[in-house]
Each structure stands twice: as structure tokens, then as C-alpha cells.
Image (cartoon, rainbow, N blue to C red):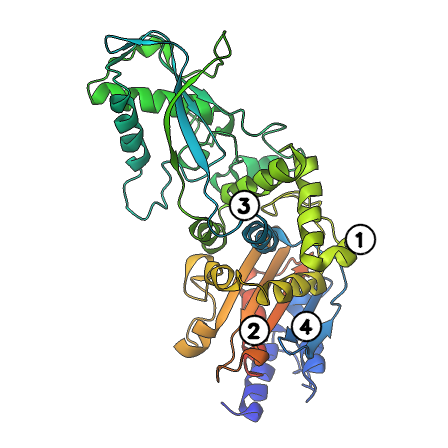
Amino acid sequence: MSRSKFKILISVALLLLSGGGATVAISADLNGEFAAMARCEALRGSVWGAFAVTADGDTLVNVNGGVRMLPASNVKLITTGAALYYLGPDFRFRTCLACDGPVIGGRLKGRLHIIGGGDPSLCDRHKSTGDSLATFTQWLSLVRKAGISSIEGGVVGDAGHFDGEDFLGDWSLEDISLEYSSAALGLNISDNLIDDGSGKACTASAPQHCARQFASFLRDHGITVPEDESGWEGTPASGELTMIGGTSSTGLGNLITVANHESENIYAEALFREMGLRVSGSASYEKSAEALGEVLSRMGLGGSLDSVQIVDGSGLSRKNYVSPEFLVAFLTNMGGRPEFGAFLQSIPSPGNGTLKNRLTGKDGSLRARVHMKSGTMNGVRCFSGYILPSDGDSGKMIAFSIMTNNVVAAGSSLASLMDAMVVRLAAEN
């Protein structure tokens, strides 16, 4: 498509978005074009910003690029990228089984402990095998290998891997009641979407639920477990445990793909808290936020940290403040790292994951070049990511961030505008 035809389409889009009024003149300058596009009715009275650079260092767009805004799930880009850098692509969460008593004649004279390691993917719906109980099957094998045919004390769940609060205090109660906002505990199961009878997620009960579910699984497979002794969280009176084995999550590359493609908050929060635990010795939200800052400093972004505030890993908090410029600085930093390939693959293209309905009707080759993370909450719409060059010249790769806050317009009209901005940027490479 020629530039002149593209500008005509933009003018038509602006005419529709403004409710039929006069079109806005489009400047030949890309920065001016973005500023003009944002004068439409959909963004009237809102706060917005856009920043875009090429890998070679050319700034393509900077309109309110330094303004701090609520990033919503765009925070996941920072969390997952920092985790990939700090924890490494080979990192896996570990969950262990242990006994607090001897095994005599096949009878465990005590309790079986499921010791969580923060794994957000235990028995979840994103298992590539399609078998959400594959982990239980592995645990059953460990129990049998230990010679256990009966467990006198039942099964208990240990979520002590993560200290501190389960939920961040300023998460909206409205959000907490919804399935996408499950918190990350030391022991998780099925995305922590536990029905408490009202149809809502009852996240705090996940460790007990995990213990009850596994006890039931053991009974179904011939292991005797008393029903009234399982499903609560506890530690052995003696403080001594005998490990009988454990299982590991899939690799970090797969975990961050779920976090970014599906915008799974529990995955992002688990990585956020794991970094806190490893950097500072505590997985509390306060220490985890400090730890993320330390990791970003190690990445060379310390000089920009006074301009941002990140308090959780998923973006649910309304105390997160990030500018388009910082997001692009982070994306550019990741673009020069050995982990970039895994990071890029974790970010969806239009038509996939949470971008299923983005850039519909556009050429497939264009959609394949765009990798971006959406960020959505009440009044917030953001897109940040990369646009790969059409000719393969790596220096032309674009890192961009488009953020809007305080928007009251219908989501459909805003989506059309932001799609048009992404397409316009893609015309540059």
C-alpha cells in the first residue's frame, strides 16, 4: 500500500472515530501523524503517549513518551523479561514430596507433605500434554517408589516457599473475585481457581485443595488415605522430613509464553515473587518490588528507575506507573540480549492469545511481524512490543509502546485507533 493511500485510510478512520466531523489533517511527519490521530473523539480528555525507536537508535515517534501512566498487563513484559535475564532460560520451579514419619510395612506412620516451590503451572489448563493431572501421575509414581501403600496421617500442603501476603493490598476487590487475578502462592493448583461454592476463585485455599485432590487421586489408584486427615496445611511436630522426590515445571521460556500470550497473572506474580526470594531472601511484595529494581539495575536500566514505579508482577495494581519511553528502553535492552529469541517468542502476534481480535483483516505477513502485549483495565488500553522488519534488516526492528489512560470511549473505537497506529508504525520497516 502506498503512503498516500494509507493517509487517506487514516483520514477515513478519523472521520468515523470523531463521529462524522471534519477529518484531521495528517502531517507528513510521523510524529505529527500520531499526534493528529490522537485528536479524535475516542481519546478526547484522556491521557495518552507513544514512543517508538528502531534497533539502530532512530526515534520514530515521541508524543508524551515520558508521561507515566498505568500500564496494566504491559508490566508482564518487564516481569518476564527480567526473569528470563535473572533466572535464566533453564530455570524451572520445583515441587517436592516428603514424609514426616517412617514407612513400615508399606504404611507411612505420619503424613505426606506436598512442598510447594511456587510453580504456577501445577495441574493447569495450559499443559502441552493436555493432561492436567500429569503431575499427580508423577507424584503417584514417587509414592509407590518409596514403598508406600497406606498413609496414616493424610496428605498436607506446604505453601511456605513464598512468605508475605498472598494478595497485594491495593488490588481491586472486583478484580480479585475474577478468575484472571489469581495470586501466586507457594503451592498452587489449577491456576488457583478454586470454587468456594459461589463460583468465585478462592485462592487462599489452594494448598489445602491441592492436598485433598491428590489424596483423592491416591485413593483412586489403590493407596489408602483417610479422608478426614487430608486437605489442611501443616508442618511436622519434629521439624524433620524425609524427601521422597519431586517434579519440575516446564522451562522458563514456556512459562513466560503462557504469561504473555494468555496474560496469566498467576505466572507473572510467581516469577515476580521468585525473583524477590532469590534477590532479597523474601517473596513479600515490598521486597519483590525492590528485587525487580535491583535486577533492572543489573540490566543497565538503573538510571531510569526514578521515573517508574512497579509494585507487582502482573499489572493488576493501580500503583504501577510506567512511561512509554521506559517500556521501549526495556524492550530495546532485551533486544540486545542472548535471551531475546525466547522473549520475542513469548509475546503474541495478532490473531493469537489475547490478540485474537487485533489487526483483523490485515495481511498475514504484517501480522506475523508484530509481537505485542496488550494491557487492559478500566480506562486503560496499552500495546507495547516489537515490529520485525519486512526485509530482515535487524537494525530496522522497531520497539514501541502506545499507552492510553482515563479513556471512557467504547473499547471498539479505541481498538480501531490503536490498530491503525500499529499499522502505521509497521509501514516504516
Please report whichever mark, 1 or 3, sits nearer to the chain's N-terminal start.
Answer: 3
What's the residue at 77%, 64% (across, down)? 66
Q: Which residue is mark 3?
A: 268
Image quadrant of residue 303?
A: bottom right
Mark drawn on residue 38: 4
Is 189 in front, or is 19?
189
Secondary structure state at the residue bearing disc 1: helix
Task: Please tell me which residue is depicted at 60% across the width and 67% down the height of the picture.
Answer: 336
Which secondary structure lies at badge 2?
helix
Neighbours of disc 4 within 10 Å: few (<14), some (14-19), many (20+): many
Q: Front-most of 110 and 201?
A: 110
Q: Quadrant of residue 225?
A: top left
**Residue 238, image x, y percentages:** 49, 7
- Asked whether 384 or 302 is in front, the reply is 302
**Residue at mark 4 to residue at mark 3: CA–CA distance:** 31 Å
- What residue is pinned by disc 2? 422
